[in-house]
Image (cartoon, helix red, strand yellow):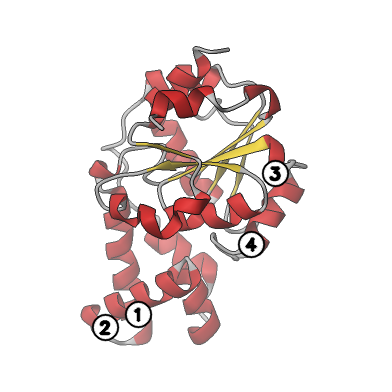
């Protein structure tokens, strides 16, 4: 089924909540913002644990694969202060992110509650949204602190999100660049949109049952959808 037909099959009358991942979803991964965060994670781990950058990289990726966020593993096995970690890794230059008026216009046409759901912090998310010109486009942000440092794709995190904003999963749709983060959402009853990119496009077969819709361009997907309103 092509994207146009998929969009037309979505009953907008039942969708009251629009949930968006932040990094590599609201801006394009070609900006390589998260690569800078990755690099700072490695430096932090190397400095705090007294290991080489190579070993720090290996540990970082191991924890990410196992827990969905490097921080979770660092807290569990190394008693790392989460605030110190987040403050350090998120001190990056965001000048590459530019205002996106087309996305702003598209989001404005979506009826219902619009939320940013991120494994980062509100401070970092607000910096990103300000650069994009989207600070007033969302009704709320649910961050890693709100989730008690339990990251996506943990079911507990999604359930806390739903409870925090009084959302009904069957009336919600979530947009994510990482398909593994759509699995809990789908099982909880949400509609899912995978915003794929070159780095993740080969992962579809692993999570196909949890993906309702797929797009390479978030703005165009929303624009096509809202034309039917």
Whichever of callouts 4 and 1 sits on the residue coming sooner in the sequence is: 1
Residue to which mark 3 is pinned: 169
Asked if disc 3 and disc 4 are in contact, CB closer than 8 Å, the reply is: no
Residue 228 drawn above or below residue 49: above
Position of residue 142 measured from the top left corner of the image (x, y, whole percent): 61, 48
Asked if disc 4 and disc 1 are in contact, CB closer than 8 Å, the reply is: no
Residue to which mark 2 is pinned: 55
Circle 3: element type: helix
Quadrant of residue 58 within the rendered picture: bottom left
Answer left or right for 108 relative to 38. right
Circle 1: element type: helix
Asked if disc 2 and disc 1 are in contact, CB closer than 8 Å, the reply is: yes
Q: Whole-Å distance between the Cαs marked 3 and 4?
A: 13 Å
Whichever of callouts 3 and 1 sits on the residue coming sooner in the sequence is: 1
* Residue at screen point 26% across, 37% down: 96
Q: Whole-Å distance between the Cαs marked 4 and 1?
A: 24 Å
Whichever of callouts 2 and 4 sits on the residue coming sooner in the sequence is: 2
């Amino acid at each position: 089924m092509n994207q146009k037909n998929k969009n037309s099959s979505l009953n907008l009358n039942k969708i009251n909540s629009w949930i968006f991942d932040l990094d590599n979803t609201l801006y394009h991964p070609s900006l390589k913002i998260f690569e800078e965060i990755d690099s700072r994670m490695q430096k932090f781990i190397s400095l705090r644990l007294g290991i080489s950058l190579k070993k720090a990289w290996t540990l970082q990726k191991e924890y990410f694969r196992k827990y969905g966020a490097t921080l979770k593993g660092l807290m569990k096995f190394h008693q790392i202060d989460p605030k110190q970690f987040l403050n350090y890794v998120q001190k990056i230059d965001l000048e590459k992110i530019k205002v996106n008026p087309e996305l702003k216009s598209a989001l404005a046409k979506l009826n219902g509650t619009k939320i940013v759901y991120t494994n980062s912090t509100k401070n970092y998310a607000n910096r990103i949204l300000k650069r994009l010109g989207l600070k007033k486009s969302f009704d709320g942000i649910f961050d890693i602190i709100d989730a008690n440092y339990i990251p996506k794709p943990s079911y507990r995190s999604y359930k806390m999100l739903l409870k925090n904003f009084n959302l009904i999963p069957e009336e919600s749709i979530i947009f994510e660049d990482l398909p593994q983060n759509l699995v809990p959402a789908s099982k909880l009853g949400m509609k899912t949109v995978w915003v794929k990119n070159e780095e993740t496009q080969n992962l579809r077969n692993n999570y196909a049952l949890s993906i309702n819709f797929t797009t390479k361009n978030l703005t165009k997907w929303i624009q096509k959808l809202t034309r039917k309103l």
